[in-house]
Structures are given as structure tokens and as C-alpha cells.
């Protein structure tokens, strides 16, 4: 989604959740300091090379979902690409599946994301106001191909094509670069495991936004957005029917 269309939605969620844009700017500044020079070159083009024209399976962390059963992909024939949302990279690697792309704000099992990057995954590292220390600590350890993203206007070296949590941001990215279809696997907007009541409320608010933003993408995007159910069927995305906590 073009930034001019996406920005009003982000401003609303930022106001609701209390995100200060100055902190977002500080986060992207930290990211730009540590990204290697090749990561700053043609970021969207490099992502598009991996996803354009393919069935893009966005993998989340819904309890019990596990890795996507690629052999059961409905409507096979179109080339497939796997995009892991943050911690789902570990689920994929455990099953012997190396994601084509990993989308991460570095709050999951980061060593698994580094391992995926070493094995060929392109990692889209997202900067925001709360992960500056993780950026400084972990980005230098990624040995492979990287792209940077943030919540503000696209600028040299980093992208913003919409999305908020790792999972919905992955779907927005696939849509923007011309995927054939987007299949959501392992998404859950209902179950939250936070023990602290305040953290639980905040997590639920984030997931409500993720659910709504995917609805926006389904309505206004260029690519069919589908639930891929465990029985092998698909159905158009129309809100939170099932689905993983991805931020």
C-alpha cells in the first residue's frame, strides 16, 4: 500500500496506543546506523524478486498450527514463497523449511532468525521506538540479506508499505510487491498468553488493530487475501475468523 494511503491509519493507531513519532524516528536512526551498505540498496526490488507473482504464505504462531503443509497448498501450480512473521521462523526451520522472507521487529527467538538468514532468508528488520537496543545488539549478527523498514515515510534505504504487527506487515509487503495470492497460516487474534493484565490489554489492542488492518488490505489491496484453514480449504479474509499473535 502506498504510504499516502497508509499513513492516516497509522496515525490513528499510534494515537490510540500512545506511540510517539519521535521515538519511531530514533528507532530508524538506530537501524540505519547498523544496517550494512548492501541492505540499503533497492530494498523493495529485492523483496519483489522473492515474492512477485507467487502464492505467498504468511506464517504466524497460532497455538498448534505448526508449519504450513506446503504439499496441501490449495490451487497449486503457481510458484510458492514462504514469509515467516518473527517467531514463526523457528517453527519453519524446525520443520526443515527455510522461509524466503522473515519479517521481524526482533522481539521473538532472534537466533532462529539469524539462522534462517544464514540459510538464505531475506530478513526485513522493522525499527520502532521500543526496539533500539535489540537493533543495536542483533542486526550486526545477521550474515545474509537484509532490508530495513519503519513506520514513517519511505526514505533512502528503508521502506514502509503498510502494516503494524509482523504478521499483517508481511501481508502488506506481499501485496505491495505483486504477489499472486496471500495465504494466511497460523494467525490467531483471540488468544493472548500475557500474565500481566496491563500487558494483556495492550496485546489485545495490538491484535485488534492487526485484524482490522488485514481487513483494510483485503478491501483495498491488489492481491487476494485468504485464510488457509487446517482442513486444506481457503476462504477470503473478512475479519478475524481464526488466526497468530505476531508482535
Image (tube, rainbow, N blue to C red):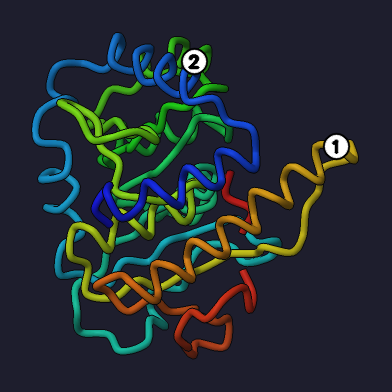
Kindly identify the residue that appears in the image at 61 percent across and 68 percent down: 243
Indicate the position of residue 229 as horizontal and vertical percent values: 55, 82
The quadrant in which residue 138 appears is top left
Kindly identify the residue that appears in the image at 59 percent across and 62 percent down: 66
Q: Marks 2 and 1, how far apart in space?
A: 22 Å
Above or below, 61 relative to 12 = below
Seen from the viewer's position, the closer of residues 179 and 22 is 22
Identify residue for label 1.
198
Q: Is residue 82 left or right of residue 13?
A: left
Indicate the position of residue 30 as horizontal and vertical percent values: 38, 12
The quadrant in which residue 103 appears is top left
Above or below, 33 relative to 95 = above
Badge 1: residue crowd in 10 Å (few <14, some 14–19, many ≥20): few
The quadrant in which residue 41 appears is top left
Kindly identify the residue that appears in the image at 43 percent across and 18 percent down: 27
Identify residue for label 2.
132
Indicate the position of residue 47 as horizontal and vertical percent values: 19, 47
Callout 2: helix, strand or loop? Answer: helix
Kindly identify the residue that appears in the image at 73 percent across and 52 percent down: 204
Callout 1: helix, strand or loop? Answer: helix
Indicate the position of residue 223 as horizontal and vertical percent values: 27, 74
Instruction: Please report whichever mark, 2 or 1, sits nearer to the chain's N-terminal start.
Output: 2
Residue 54 numbered tag: none
Q: Quadrant of the N terminus?
A: bottom left
Amino acid at each position: 500500500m502506498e504510504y499516502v494511503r497508509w499513513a492516516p491509519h497509522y496515525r490513528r493507531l499510534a494515537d490510540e496506543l500512545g506511540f510517539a513519532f519521535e521515538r519511531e524516528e530514533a528507532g530508524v536512526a538506530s537501524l540505519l546506523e547498523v544496517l550494512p551498505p548492501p541492505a540499503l540498496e533497492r530494498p523493495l526490488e529485492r523483496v519483489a524478486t522473492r515474492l512477485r507473482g507467487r502464492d505467498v504464505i504468511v506464517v504466524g504462531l497460532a497455538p498448534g498450527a505448526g508449519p504450513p503443509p506446503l504439499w496441501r497448498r490449495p490451487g497449486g501450480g503457481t510458484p510458492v514463497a514462504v514469509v515467516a512473521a518473527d517467531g514463526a521462523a523457528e517453527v519453519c526451520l524446525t520443520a526443515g523449511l527455510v522461509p524466503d522472507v522473515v519479517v521481524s521487529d526482533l522481539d521473538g527467538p532472534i537466533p532462529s532468525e539469524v539462522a534462517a538468514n544464514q540459510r538464505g532468508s531475506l530478513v526485513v528488520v522493522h525499527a520502532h521506538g521500543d526496539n533500539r537496543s535489540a537493533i543495536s545488539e542483533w542486526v550486526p549478527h545477521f550474515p545474509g540479506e537484509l532490508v530495513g523498514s519503519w513506520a514513517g515515510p519511505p526514505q533512502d534505504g528503508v521502506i514502509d508499505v503498510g502494516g503494524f504487527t509482523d504478521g499483517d506487515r508481511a501481508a502488506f509487503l506481499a501485496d505491495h510487491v505483486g504477489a499472486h495470492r496471500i495465504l494466511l497460516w497460523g494467525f490467531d487474534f483471540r488468544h493472548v498468553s500475557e500474565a500481566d493484565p496491563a500487558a494483556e490489554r495492550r496485546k489485545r489492542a495490538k491484535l485488534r488493530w492487526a485484524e482490522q488492518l488485514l481487513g483494510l488490505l483485503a478491501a483495498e489491496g491488489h492481491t487476494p487475501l485468504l485464510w488457509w484453514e487446517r482442513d486444506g480449504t481457503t476462504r477470503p479474509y473478512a475479519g478475524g475468523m481464526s488466526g497468530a499473535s505476531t508482535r
